[in-house]
Image: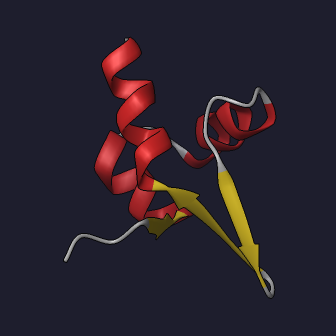
Amino acid sequence: MEPITVSIEGTKQATGLGVTKIYELINQGKLETVKIGRRTLVKTASIRALVEAA
């Protein structure tokens, strides 16, 4: 089963982008996140959509 969310570090590894750029994309609404406690998790579907739109 594929994960539906990944950590910021996982997003960094999957996309090859830096942490600053990832947070930029989150703030622009291009990456969807979920907050669980103190953790920020990025939805894998939004990562796919970002890559496919590029």
Q: Is residue 37 left or right of residue 31?
A: right
Please say if 39 is above or below 53: below
x%, y% of residue 35?
A: 76, 72
x%, y% of residue 26?
A: 71, 40
The quadrant in which the N terminus is found is bottom left
Q: Is residue 3 left or right of residue 47?
A: left
Residue drawn 63% across and 29% down?
A: 30
Q: Is residue 13 left or right of residue 40?
A: left
Please say if 10 is above or below 45: below
User: Which residue, as the protein is rendered here, is positioned at the far left?
Assistant: 1
User: Which residue, as the protein is rendered here, is positioned at the far front?
Assistant: 1
Residue drawn 51% across and 42% down?
A: 18
Residue drawn 40% across and 64% down?
A: 10
User: Which residue, as the protein is rendered here, is positioned at the far bottom?
Assistant: 37
- Describe the colour scheme in one phrase: secondary structure
Please say if 51 is above or below 45: above
x%, y% of residue 31?
A: 61, 39
x%, y% of residue 20?
A: 66, 41
Residue nearest the viewer, comparing 14 with 1: 1
The image quarter containing residue 33 is bottom right
Badge count: 0
Residue drawn 37% across and 11% down?
A: 54
Residue nearest the viewer, comparing 21 with 28: 28
